[in-house]
């Protein structure tokens, strides 16, 4: 399958100049539609690698950056973040931090509205995302009244409304109970059926190992072990 992510000789340190590297000489390609588990202990570099893929590094987090990251032929270090967000979507560990609307519908509509799409297109994308994530019944609910699993589904729906090809998940199971975990695995199955490329950074590998993974990558002290 053709590569959608290509990382060449990537190293990064959050300290400018000298300093211990959080990532060391990462080289990897990920194909279109792959479902990848990025495993590793806390502090191993999982979140940093995701930030290098979605462009938060080097555009929001600064430090010493070496190497190249390509996402769908875009050189991440030179691409505009708004452009990258249409290709790569990220669900954060603390999902509350990325939910900004008053209601579920408002939150999902926020991304496509920022793309200056016609209102009718925004409505269509919101409707589709609600249906795909099976949360149409939550459309008018206020975000603060949702469970952890429901909030995560809203966050995923908000990204789906942007229609990216790549979905990144940073420790998605951290704050979920058993119902939330089932909701997450179901949501990932939906994304898989749509042919999306999925990378899940997670240390609770026992749950992800039961899913239909294409590959497991292990990161340890900033080095990628496959």
Image (spheres, rainbow, N blue to C red):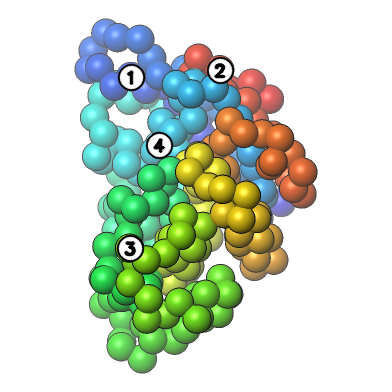
Position of residue 222 relative to residue 38, above or below, is: above
Q: Residue 144 got which mark?
A: 3
**How many numbered callouts?**
4
3D distance between C-alphas at marks 1 and 4:
12 Å
3D distance between C-alphas at marks 3 and 4:
31 Å
Mark nearer the N terminus (1 vs 4): 1
- Element at label 2: strand
**In this view of the protein, can residue 178 be seen by the observer?**
yes
3D distance between C-alphas at marks 2 and 4:
17 Å
Q: Residue 60 got which mark?
A: none
- What residue did someone put label 1 on? 13
Q: For residue 197, what is the image quadrant?
A: bottom right
- What residue did someone put label 2 on? 220
Depth check, mark 3 against mark 1: the one in front is 3
Q: Residue at x 26, y 24 (%)?
A: 63
In this rendered view, identify the residue nearer to me: 5 or 41: 41
Q: Residue 52 got which mark?
A: 4
Classed neighbour count for the residue bearing mark 4: other residues with Cα under 10 Å, few (<14), some (14–19), many (≥20)? many
Depth check, mark 3 against mark 2: the one in front is 3
Mark nearer the N terminus (3 vs 1): 1
Mark nearer the N terminus (1 vs 2): 1
């Amino acid at each position: 399958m053709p590569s959608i992510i290509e990382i060449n000789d990537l190293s990064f340190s959050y300290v400018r100049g000298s300093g211990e590297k959080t990532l060391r000489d990462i080289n990897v390609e990920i194909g279109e539609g792959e479902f990848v588990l990025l495993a590793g202990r806390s502090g191993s570099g999982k979140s940093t690698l995701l930030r290098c893929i979605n462009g938060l590094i080097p555009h929001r987090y600064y430090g010493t950056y070496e190497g190249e990251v390509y996402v769908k032929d875009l050189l991440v270090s030179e691409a505009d973040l708004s452009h990258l967000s249409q290709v790569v979507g990220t669900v954060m560990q603390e999902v509350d931090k990325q939910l900004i609307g008053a209601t579920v519908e408002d939150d999902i509509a926020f991304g496509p509205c920022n793309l200056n799409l016609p209102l009718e297109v925004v409505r269509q994308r919101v409707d589709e995302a609600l249906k795909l994530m099976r949360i149409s019944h939550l459309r008018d609910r206020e975000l603060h009244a949702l469970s952890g699993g429901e909030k995560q589904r809203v966050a995923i729906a908000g990204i789906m409304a942007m229609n990216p090809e790549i979905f990144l998940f940073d420790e998605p199971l951290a704050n979920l109970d058993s119902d939330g975990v089932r909701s997450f695995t179901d949501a990932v199955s939906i994304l898989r059926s749509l042919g999306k490329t999925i990378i899940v950074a997670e240390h609770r590998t026992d749950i992800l190992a039961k899913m239909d993974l294409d590959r497991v990558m292990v990161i340890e002290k900033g080095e990628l072990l496959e």
